[in-house]
Image: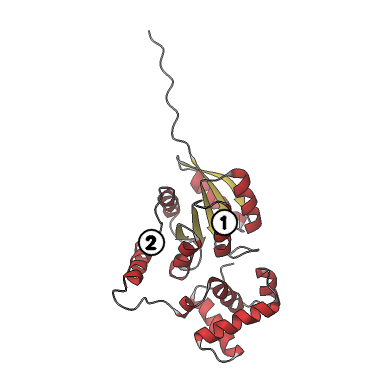
Amino acid sequence: MAAKKPSAPGPKRKKILLVDDHPLMRRGQADLLEREADLMVCGEAGTARAAMEAITKLQPDLVLVDMALPDKDGLELIKDIQALQPGLPVLAMSMQDESLYASRVLRAGGRGYVMKGDAPEQLAAAIRTVLSGQVALSPRMSAKMLESMVGKSGQTGEGPEAKLSDRELEVLRLFGGGWSTEEIANRLHLSPKTVDVHRAHIKEKLGLKTTPEFQRFAIRWVTAQGGPDQ
């Protein structure tokens, strides 16, 4: 009797690097992804700096990035990743509604956006979508971005924050979360004077005349977005 030929090995599992400063969140993501036959978690990082080191060492196929990290804004990390390894797929995740950050993530070089409140199976589906070379957004956000590009209605429905740069948006978010000028400067590795300049630009773009008016707007805006992301 002829000997049985050894079965061919299955497809190689794609390596996912998790970047989130909450260990319990990373643990939940890891448990979910390790149950998928085609995906595996190759490493975890709690800061942007650790993420950059892990990317060089582990060479992941995709990086799942939280938008709020203790040492750097998620958008800035995505830009750093693309500078280090152009084309490395990055999927962003946040508590904030995708209408706020999705288009900025794509401009920064990311390939998709998922909400932390989405069903677990949606995360795995979004990862596979990005790994296949496509962009992972909800149907609602995809339609909104298409309408914005086509200009069908002449109105994009975007809030006033659409006028702000990525850095200005981060400064607005931090002020609205109760951070002081000095704390924001330390967080963003800027001088307090530069933070004040960003605040002045935000006030000008949004038509806010005084600092108290700016502060009230920032707090209301953060509250409307669901509160601080960390």
Q: Quadrant of the C terminus?
A: bottom right
Q: Callout 2: helix, strand or loop?
A: loop
Drawn side of residue 117 relative to residue 179, left or right: left
Q: Report the residue that reaches farthest toward the left.
A: 152
Earlier along the polypeptide chain: callout 1 or callout 2? 1
Q: Looking at this view, is 59 or 29 the one in front?
A: 59
How many marks the image carries: the answer is 2
Where is residue 126 drawn, in percent x and y? 42, 53
For the point 45% across and 65% down, which residue is it?
102
Q: Report the residue that reaches farthest toward the bottom.
A: 209
Q: Which residue is mark 2?
A: 138
Tell me if mark 2 has few (under 14), some (14-19) or many (20+) residues whose alpha carbon lies within 10 angstroms of its own.
some
Tell me if mark 1 has few (under 14), some (14-19) or many (20+) residues whose alpha carbon lies within 10 angstroms of its own.
few
User: What's the amino acid at mark 2?
Assistant: Ser
Q: Which residue is mark 1?
A: 83
On screen, 137 above or below 149? above
Q: Nearer the viewer, mark 1 or mark 2?
A: 1
Q: Callout 1: helix, strand or loop?
A: helix
Instruction: State the separation of the CA atoms marked 1 and 2.
Output: 27 Å
User: What's the amino acid at mark 1?
Assistant: Ala
For the point 45% across and 57% down, which residue is it?
111
- Camera sees residue 180: no
Where is residue 55 drawn, in percent x and y? 60, 49
- Camera sees residue 76: yes
Drawn side of residue 48 relative to residue 90, left or right: right
